[in-house]
Image (spheres, rainbow, N blue to C red):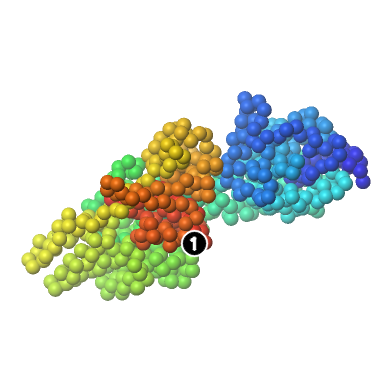
């Protein structure tokens, strides 16, 4: 069959199809002949359209840039694909009806090309960025998933333009993941398919067996909705903020996830954790003393600068209630969540009205039992749960049980300083509760060891120092002063190094985002959480991301294009050492030493190893650094 006859067939069925090309329902491959779409398209450009004052063009460019920034390039095709807004003349030349909504992905002179027309923008998108993100994400997925390279060949347009049902569904699934990763809203995006149905464009009747209708595709997306939450940029960024203990930002991220995915138990658990950590960070040493509990193993309870505290210090009953509500919702959705139970147990140890030891012990006992069988938890997480259970038992007056669980935690902890510190503190509290004179010296020794390895930024460190000082005032005690204890805690390198993007141009924590954009130029802005002024500014050609609100909160170096990190040793004329992506774990240890920790968060798909002495973190993939992160770590004493 000739190309001309192929076009005639398309023209004849046009009224039946209502649309020739809708989001890849029918997608052109490389056309041949004098009247082809490839020839009809005139000089497409990547993301650059004529008439920049046109709001449709501005929306196209903005959405396209964000999608390309989060998409994985498809080798061996040129990247990024070209984006083109079809004119009515081009559509007419290709025997298409300009008033019908159209979008497709194809190859143009061997390079990937994505096209849309104004009818689609006017009748389907209607100025909504999330709808457009799903549409463009679908077409971009046909490129990244390799569909356009393997389109069927043949002599007719009809034969050459049909993707399989499986490829359409795959492009739908990947397209919405791209839209979510770029910060767009799932519910708003799904209005796009609904608009096709409302306009009577649900099912092209010619291919009922090979192409799912929009009703079917919408149902599949809704059915798979529960598995899409982790595609949201807000979730992965929320995990990052939990890990670096910036809990207010984490709360915003997970609140946006549960708003879009109310059945996402992981997000509810993380939201509850973030809120509880905010609550704990607001507590004063006198509040902890009033609770009369031991050293809890959890991310909060750090005496951080006022600039990192968004709410007034002291007990915040409403925040505690919000935290426990989110955790209880997570357990309603998934009753076997080990860490959600463990976190609820901690919450009841610091309940605003006073500790509820019975409920705390119940949750922590269930968590400790489950932790031993939970393959998703490492030994450090199990040790942390046991430490917290021992705290609840000691508060309940069950010293023997507390001691037994501390011993179990100690065997799991190995050389992890943060857990060993908590064990030493709680062991000292056990000895002090016994009120036996011969054990007070042992308690003093345990507290001394705790103070030497614990973080002075921890609220527990001050309480431990107070207990140690009281013991030292007793006859026969030989103790060190606070100054002597703090001695030797010097850092080898100056913390929070600036990132030298190019010669003479630096970015540093605390810099104004506006000033950074003046220095580095425009970035692809990816919102981290809707309704919050918190964004990830991506500089693809520089290999870095800048994360912040009005100021830089973190700097990510995440590709081979990223500049090296230069660490300056403290003191006059200190030596400079270099950190790069691609370094092995051994190479990193040779530079930074073995002092590091990995924070425990729920379902963290991208764990970081933190080096608190310098304020940086590394994400390792297959034993090599895939990303360096410069970030404020509240564990470091200010």
Between 281 and 444, the one lying in front of the other is 444
Residue at the spot x=64%, y=47% of the render? Answer: 175
Describe residue 204's horizontal placement relative to residue 240 as left or right. Answer: right
* Residue 126 percent coordinates (x, y): 65, 33
* Residue 381 percent coordinates (x, y): 40, 65
Residue at the spot x=83%, y=32% of the render? Answer: 93
* Residue 204 percent coordinates (x, y): 80, 45
Describe residue 320's horizontal placement relative to residue 107 as left or right. Answer: left
- Up/down of 105 relative to 622, above or below: above
Please rate how many residues cluster around mark 1, counting C-alpha atoms within 10 Å: few if below 14, some from 14 to 19, many from 20: few
Residue at the spot x=44%, y=67% of the render? Answer: 378
Residue at the spot x=52%, y=34% of the render? Answer: 522
How many numbered circles are shown?
1
**Quarter of the rendering containing residue 68:** top right
Residue, disc 1: 623
Is residue 364 in view from this perspective?
A: no
Describe residue 254's horizontal placement relative to residue 298 as left or right. Answer: right
Describe residue 283's horizontal placement relative to residue 47 as left or right. Answer: left
């Amino acid at each position: 069959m000739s190309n001309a006859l192929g076009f005639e067939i398309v023209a004849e069925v046009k009224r039946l199809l209502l649309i020739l090309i809708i989001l890849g329902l029918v997608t052109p491959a490389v056309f041949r002949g004098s009247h082809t779409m490839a020839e009809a398209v005139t000089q497409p450009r990547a993301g650059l359209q004529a008439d920049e004052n046109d709001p449709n063009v501005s929306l196209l460019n903005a959405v396209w840039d964000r999608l390309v920034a989060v998409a994985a390039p498809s080798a061996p095709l040129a990247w990024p694909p070209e984006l083109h807004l079809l004119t009515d003349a081009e559509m007419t030349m290709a025997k298409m009806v300009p008033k019908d909504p159209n979008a497709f992905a194809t190859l143009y002179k061997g390079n990937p090309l994505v096209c849309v027309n104004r009818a689609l923008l006017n009748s389907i998108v209607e100025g909504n960025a999330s709808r457009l993100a799903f549409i463009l994400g679908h077409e971009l997925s046909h490129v990244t998933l390799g569909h356009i390279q393997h389109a069927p060949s043949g002599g007719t347009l009809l034969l050459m333009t049909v993707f399989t049902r499986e490829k359409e569904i795959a492009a739908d699934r990947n397209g919405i993941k791209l839209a979510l990763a770029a910060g767009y809203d799932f519910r708003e995006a799904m209005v796009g398919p609904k608009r096709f149905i409302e306009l009577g464009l649900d099912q092209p009747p010619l291919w009922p067996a090979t192409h799912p209708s929009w009703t079917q595709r919408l149902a599949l997306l809704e059915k798979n909705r529960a598995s899409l939450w982790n595609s949201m940029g807000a979730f992965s960024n929320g995990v990052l903020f939990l890990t670096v203990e910036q809990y207010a930002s984490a709360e915003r991220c997970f609140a946006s996830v549960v708003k879009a995915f109310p059945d996402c138990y992981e997000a509810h658990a993380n939201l509850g954790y973030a809120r509880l950590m905010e609550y704990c960070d607001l507590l004063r040493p006198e509040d902890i003393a009033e609770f009369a509990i031991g050293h809890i193993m959890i991310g909060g309870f750090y005496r951080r600068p006022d600039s990192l505290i968004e709410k007034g210090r002291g007990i915040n009953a409403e925040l505690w209630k919000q935290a426990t509500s989110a955790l209880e919702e997570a357990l309603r959705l998934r009753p076997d969540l080990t860490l959600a139970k463990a976190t609820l147990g901690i919450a009841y140890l610091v309940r605003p009205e006073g500790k509820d030891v019975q409920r705390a012990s119940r949750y922590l006992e269930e968590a400790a039992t489950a932790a031993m069988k939970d393959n998703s938890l490492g030994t450090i997480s199990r040790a942390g749960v046991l430490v917290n259970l021992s705290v609840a038992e000691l508060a309940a007056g069950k010293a023997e049980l507390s001691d037994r669980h501390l011993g179990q935690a100690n065997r799991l902890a190995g050389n992890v300083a943060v857990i060993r510190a908590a064990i030493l503190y709680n062991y000292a509290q056990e000895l002090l509760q016994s009120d036996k004179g011969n054990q007070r010296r042992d308690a003093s020794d345990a507290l001394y060891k705790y103070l030497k390895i614990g973080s002075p930024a921890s609220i527990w460190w001050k309480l431990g120092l107070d207990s140690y000082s009281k013991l030292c005032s007793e006859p026969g005690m030989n103790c060190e002063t606070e100054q002597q204890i703090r001695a030797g805690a010097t850092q080898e390198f100056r913390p929070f190094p600036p990132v030298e993007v190019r010669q003479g141009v630096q970015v540093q924590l605390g810099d104004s985002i506006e000033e950074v954009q003046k220095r580095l130029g425009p970035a692809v802005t990816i919102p981290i959480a809707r309704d919050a002024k918190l964004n990830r500014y991506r500089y693809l050609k520089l290999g870095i991301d800048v994360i912040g609100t009005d100021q830089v909160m973190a700097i990510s170096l995440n590709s081979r294009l990223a500049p090296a990190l230069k660490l300056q040793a403290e003191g006059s004329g200190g030596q400079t050492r270099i950190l790069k992506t691609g370094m092995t774990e051994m190479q990193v240890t040779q530079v930074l030493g073995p002092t590091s920790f990995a924070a425990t968060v729920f379902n963290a798909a991208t764990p970081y190893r933190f080096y608190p002495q310098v304020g940086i973190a590394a994400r390792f993939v297959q034993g090599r650094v895939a990303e360096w992160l410069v970030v404020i770590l509240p564990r470091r004493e200010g």
